[in-house]
């Protein structure tokens, strides 16, 4: 730490308190808007969903956040914080700390310091709890705060503000490029299946399949790493409709079960039960599994007639055209939704000749490869921006920003 700086516990340079406990049976007074930890983001507030609870007039002073107060999460994401910059006060609940800085501490300095501690991992040593962690009032009050003179705090904060703004602009640009890279294939799929193949002969899913098979059901007790055969589940089909791999669970099978359920290269795999958002994801098994592999009962294996290339059907199932047809077929509760073969059988898919199918698959493999390389590049840039921000914060609190 730089010479001339002091270190003091937060409670010596700021007032802090927890918000009011939410209890609809005991709370009295007037319903008023209040902040929860879900409303507090790093350096900002999300006020799209603000609840109300009852506060009495005598509680207003203790349980309101005023301009320049730092609001810090006690739970949820302990330590995450933002500064209230509104003229209108707002109430806050017990999941949050309100910190009102004294004459020795700038609120911006405190917010940046907590962000630095979070990025470095040092903040977790001040939390309590093993599963769900909390940043208690006692831990917050005793948190050591480095304190340069106020003028130096203002100067360093100004440098960090400028860097923070520049990095935010750079991150927004990279994220926009990343979204564009992800949209390339989808835009081409839309062009192909909604326009170019519009006049192509369509055939039902039932007409092009040769076999469908729901996988084996095994309970948790029948799954362990020391059993004979890999057990493919819905999580091994990635959300972007690619085979994910990384199979950890294994099961035993009878010879007849293995013969019937063993997966092979080129099998089309369809997720029949999942959340509403993810049900229906699919993929093609790209290579012959090293270890004999069977699938579970939330995955349907499909094998097609000889004139059908499975990768072409996988592309069709990634297209908006087929997704629009699948959406009304989903059935079930809000948490678990199913799509079974009887619902899929009448979906109509444009089927060109096999040579055209092969050409389309090869073209989209090149596009996928390009998209993945671009995404990898942009993700590295995002990592570099995060690292740069953390190094700037570390330099700031070592007193090395000039």
Image (cartoon, helix red, strand yellow):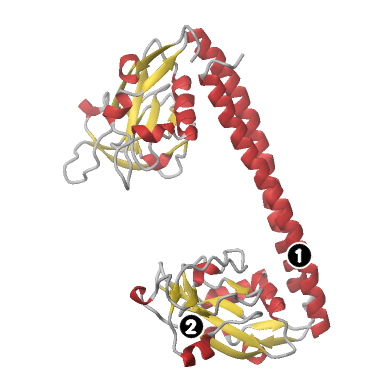
| In this picture, residue 62 sits left or right of residue 84 | left
Number of labels in the image equals 2
- Mark earlier in primary sequence (1, 2): 1
| In this picture, residue 113 sits left or right of residue 168 | left
Across and down, in percent, residue 90 comes to 36, 31
Q: Nearer the viewer, residue 126 or 34?
A: 126
Relative height, residue 7 to residue 198 (above, below): above
Element assignment for label 1: helix
Task: Please rate how many residues cluster around mark 2, counting C-alpha atoms within 10 Å: few if below 14, some from 14 to 19, many from 20.
Answer: many
Q: Quadrant of residue 124?
A: top left
Q: CA distance from mark 1 to mark 2?
A: 33 Å
Element assignment for label 2: loop
Across and down, in percent, residue 323 comes to 61, 72
Across and down, in percent, residue 223 comes to 39, 74
Q: Kindly identify which numbered label has been placed on residue 81.
A: none
Across and down, in percent, residue 154 comes to 52, 13
Q: Quadrant of residue 117?
A: top left
| In this picture, residue 90 sits left or right of residue 28 | right
Q: Quadrant of residue 95?
A: top left
Q: Nearer the viewer, residue 340 or 152?
A: 152
Q: Which residue is mark 2?
A: 215
* Residue at (54% x, 20% y) in the render: 396
| Residue 71 visible in image | yes
Q: Which residue is mark 1?
A: 188
| Residue 85 visible in image | no
* Residue at (59% x, 91% y) in the render: 211
| In this picture, residue 267 sits left or right of residue 152 | right
Q: Nearer the viewer, residue 242 or 257?
A: 257
* Residue at (56% x, 69% y) in the render: 237
Q: Quadrant of the C terminus?
A: top right
């Amino acid at each position: 730490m730089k010479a001339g700086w002091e270190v003091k516990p937060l409670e010596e340079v700021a007032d802090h308190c927890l918000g009011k406990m939410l209890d609809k049976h005991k709370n009295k007074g007037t319903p008023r808007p209040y902040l929860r930890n879900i409303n507090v983001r790093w350096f900002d507030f999300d006020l799209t969903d603000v609840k109300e609870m009852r506060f009495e007039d005598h509680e207003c002073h203790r349980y309101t956040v005023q301009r320049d107060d730092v609001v810090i999460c006690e739970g949820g994401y302990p330590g995450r914080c933002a500064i209230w910059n509104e003229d209108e006060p707002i109430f806050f609940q017990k999941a949050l700390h309100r910190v009102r800085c004294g004459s020795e501490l700038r609120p911006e300095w405190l917010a940046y310091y907590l962000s630095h501690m979070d990025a470095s991992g040092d903040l977790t040593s001040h939390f309590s709890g093993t599963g769900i962690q909390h940043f208690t009032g006692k831990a917050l009050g005793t948190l050591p705060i480095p304190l340069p003179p106020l003028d130096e705090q203002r100067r360093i904060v100004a440098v960090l503000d400028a860097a923070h703004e520049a990095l935010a602009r750079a991150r927004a640009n990279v994220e926009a490029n990343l979204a564009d890279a992800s949209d390339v294939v989808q835009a081409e799929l839309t062009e192909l299946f909604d326009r170019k193949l519009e006049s192509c002969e369509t055939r039902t899913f039932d007409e092009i399949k040769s076999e469908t098979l729901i996988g084996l059901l095994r309970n948790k007790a029948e799954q362990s790493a020391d059993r004979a055969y890999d057990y493919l589940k819905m999580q091994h089909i990635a959300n972007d409709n690619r085979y994910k791999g990384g199979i950890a669970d294994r099961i035993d099978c009878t010879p007849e079960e293995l013969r019937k359920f063993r997966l092979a290269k080129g099998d089309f795999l369809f997720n029949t039960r999942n959340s509403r958002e993810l049900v229906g994801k699919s993929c093609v098994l790209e290579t012959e599994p090293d270890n004999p592999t069977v699938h579970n009962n939330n995955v349907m294996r499909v094998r097609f007639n000889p004139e059908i290339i499975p990768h072409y059907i996988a592309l069709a199932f990634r297209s908006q055209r087929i997704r629009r047809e699948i959406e009304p077929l989903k059935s079930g509760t809000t948490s678990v939704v199913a799509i079974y073969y009887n619902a899929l059988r009448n979906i109509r898919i444009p089927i060109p000749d096999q040579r055209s199918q092969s050409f389309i698959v090869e073209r989209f493999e090149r596009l996928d490869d390009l998209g993945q390389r671009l995404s990898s590049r942009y993700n590295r840039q995002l990592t570099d921006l995060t690292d740069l921000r953390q190094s700037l914060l570390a330099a700031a609190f070592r007193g090395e920003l000039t």
